[in-house]
Image (cartoon, rainbow, N blue to C red):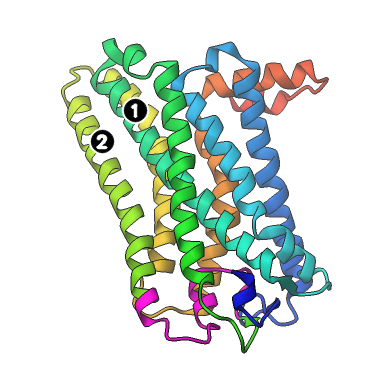
Amino acid sequence: MRNASVVTMFILLGIPHTEDLETMLFVLFLSFYIFTLIGNLLILLAIVSSTRLHTPMYFFLCELSMCDIFFPSVSSPKMLFYLSGNSRAISYAGCVSQLFFYHFLGCTECFLYTVMAYDRFVAICYPLRYSIIMSHRACALLAIGTSFFGCIQATFLTALTFQLPYCGPNEVDYYFCDIPVMLKLACADTSALEMVGFISVGLMPLSCFLLILTSYSRIAYSILQIRSAEGQQRAFSTCSAHLTAILLFYMPVVLIYLRPTPSPWMDATVQILNNLVTPMLNPLIYSLRNKEVKSSLRKALRQLGFHPEQLQRDE
């Protein structure tokens, strides 16, 4: 792949229209990144340390937290590196790696949200058969499947992008290597590939979203059949966090990849929200009103020598 290209290095120009704001952005994005890592590591600690949370729902939440740790780590370290005054250069192989792992983790997370919706569908619509349908074997296969199909999708998109010759400009008008900005640098006609990429990037999230919509349509119908208001509220509370996370995940995807007229500044702003803010908010979304997670986390922190009285007050 690399031998077909004259360019051996790219220059990341960063976020458009943010000149002289590097120091402020460095502090802001570093804070987001640190809080993202800490929040998701705490979720992992709470789930792993408590046998009460060793259920399918928390198993998939654990996988989501792992994705939310690695997903921002694809682009954030390099962005923070050049915002601190260091080189903006990235090697050809580094650019390929960024694009692959960004779409691999993004697609994996997209499939994972679909699986989590299916898990909630089985739990609410077929509660008596839940433990049979969502067995350990089924959960393992679903978890492996999300990563496998995410890898297939990312491999296709990466090969599609870097089979093109790059022999001229090497300045990437963005803060990391992504498909739309890389196609602009190719020394070939990319119209057909742009259409294929548009269909591929759009079809996968759309398919997942339709499956999620189907699951939650059935869930809503089942909740409405519950006679007690308390039962309806309890059933809805188990789904509200997932629905919030889905909206935060899909809105940036639609704005970035499915708009007919791209805007570099808006795309970069939305991408920052997608890369840093959403992974940072997910631990809060899934644990803020979850007493089991907070209780398990409090016990785990006490075993490590911490005394999280704040969690006690929140509860």
Q: Amino acid at mark 1?
A: Arg
Mark 2 vs mark 1, CA separation in Å = 8 Å
> Which residue is outermost to the front?
3
Query: N-terminal of the two: label 2 or label 1?
Result: 1
Q: Position of residue 184 (x, y in %)?
A: 51, 83
Question: Which of the labelled discs sits on residue 120, or is there none?
Answer: 1
Residue at 58% x, 12% y: name it: 51
Examine the rendered structure and indicate whether residue 74 appears above or below residue 211: below
Residue at 40% x, 46% y: name it: 246
Q: Position of residue 88 (x, y in %)?
A: 75, 75
Front residue of 11 and 217: 11
Segment tinted magenta in the rendering: 173-193
Secondary element type, mark 2 = helix
Residue at 63% x, 23% y: name it: 46
Question: Which of the labelled discs sits on residue 48, or is there none?
Answer: none
Left or right? Give the position of 259 relative to 107: left
Specify the quadrant that holds the C terminus: top right
Q: Position of residue 129 (x, y in %)?
A: 28, 12
Secondary element type, mark 1 = helix
Residue at 43% x, 24% y: name it: 139
The answer to whether one can see residue 288 in this image is no
The residue beneath circle 2 is 215
Residues at badges 2 and 1 in contact (C-beta under 8 Å)?
A: yes
Front residue of 69 and 90: 90
Left or right? Give the position of 224 relative to 71: left
> Which residue is outermost to the bottom?
168
